[in-house]
Image (cartoon, grey):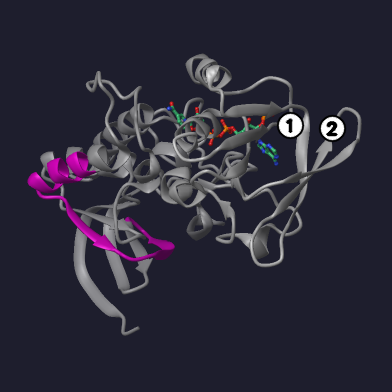
Amino acid sequence: MKKIMNRETYDLIIIGGGPAGLTAGLYAARAKLKTLLLEKLPLTGGQTINAWMLENYPGFPDGISGPELIKKMETQARKFGLMIKTGEVNEIKVSGDMKQVVHEEGDYFCRTIIVATGASPSRLGVKGEKRLIGKGISFCGTCDGFFFKDKDVVLVGGGDTAMEEALFLTRFVRKLSVVHRRDSLRATRILQDRAFENDKINFIWDTVVEGIEGEKNVDKVILKNVKTGEISVEETDGIFVFVGTNPNTQCLQGFIDLDKQGFILTNKNLETSAPGVFAAGDVRKKLLRQISTAVGDGATAAFAAEKYIDSFHS
Ligand code: NAP
């Protein structure tokens, strides 16, 4: 691909177009910072785009779907002048006070950066998984649930995502077996209660997946009880995996301080170890990863970036 040389300098470049990035974009645009948001995928939204119903984002008593919320956030940010471009950021370089964002289409220059690249679903890392992704293994119920109409599926994980997706999948599937490595769930109480009350869902406790099998498509999953060591085989039409997330920090390795899982370390103003580089949302090390906390991060990071720029003029 031919690289474009973007000599224009931005006040702020936001990397990532999920709720944190779009909120940062809204605040920065309203603060009249010349701001560009770079989103890797053709659509903004990050993981939120896969949420069929959000019930804990304030202001929507009847809930709102992820795509609908993102559409509203993007429209609002663009209304105040946020520019959005798609394509992948490969690297960030710092030379004095100027930052260079190495993008697949060319380099962009700016005074401050907000990293809001979010996180991606973790894999199980078991035998058969890599080969059968897209052939019965899925990481998104909203995207793939329809293909499992009246089928029996296995779902791995015990967190909020796992329970939300399990409940959603019961619209389609005949039976859903939740495989969880402990004997109690991590998910919020209200989601646990709903899952326990759902007749289509059964639980296989204290169990991990050892392997996934199937010639063309998934047809069985090998399970191991972690307490007894017993191995069993569960026949299944598909397997949904929701075992947490990994931060999208590949383009930042060696550039800013990360924790041992790769999440970005920030101070209370969301500044990273690189002056003028801030982080917001699921990509940073934090207690609670929610859309509501991502939105708060976006606002704080944009305000802090504005103050950082002002400090050079005072
Ligand atoms: P999570 O909270 O980290 O839960 C991951 C689940 O997968 C846990 O139950 C964990 O077991 C299990 N697990 C991890 N590694 C595993 C492995 N190798 N094999 C088998 N099981 C494994 O991840 P999440 O559910 O994706 O949620 C991520 C964040 O987003 C959380 O902060 C969550 O609260 C938030 N979220 C919120 C909502 C909402 O508010 N509506 C919806 C979705 C996500 P253990 O419990 O034993 O560790």
Q: Does the stretch in magenta take in 92?
A: yes
Question: Residue 219: image x %, image y %?
Answer: 69, 55
Q: Where is residue 297, by image quadrant?
A: top left
Answer yes or no: disc 1 within 8 Å of ligand 1. Answer: yes
Q: Label 1: few (<14), some or many (≥20) within 10 Å?
A: many
- Residue nearer the viewer, 210 or 235: 235
Front residue of 271 and 35: 35
Q: Amino acid at mark 2?
A: Val
Q: Which mark is residue 181?
A: 1
Give x and y (percent) for residue 145.
47, 46
Helix, strand or loop at mark 2: loop
Q: Is residue 54 left or right of residue 187?
A: left
Give the magenta range. 71-97
Ligand 1 rendered quadrant: top right
Looking at the rendered structure, the secondary structure element under dot 1 is loop
Q: Nearer the viewer, residue 87 or 202?
A: 202
For the N terminus, which image quadrant?
bottom left
- Mark toward the start of the polypeptide (2 vs 1): 1
Within 10 Å of the Cα at label 2, are there few (<14), some (14-19), or many (20+) other Cα atoms? some
Q: Tag 1: residue type? A: Arg
Residue at left offset 23%, top offset 23%: 60
Tell me if I can see residue 247 in this picture. no
Q: How many marks?
A: 2
Q: What number is the disc on residue 226?
A: 2
Quadrant position of the C terminus in the picture: top left
* Disc 2/disc 1 C-alpha distance (Å): 7 Å
The residue positioned 38% from the left and 65% from the top of the image is 88
Residue 284's spot in the image, x, y percent? 48, 38
33 lies above or below 178: below
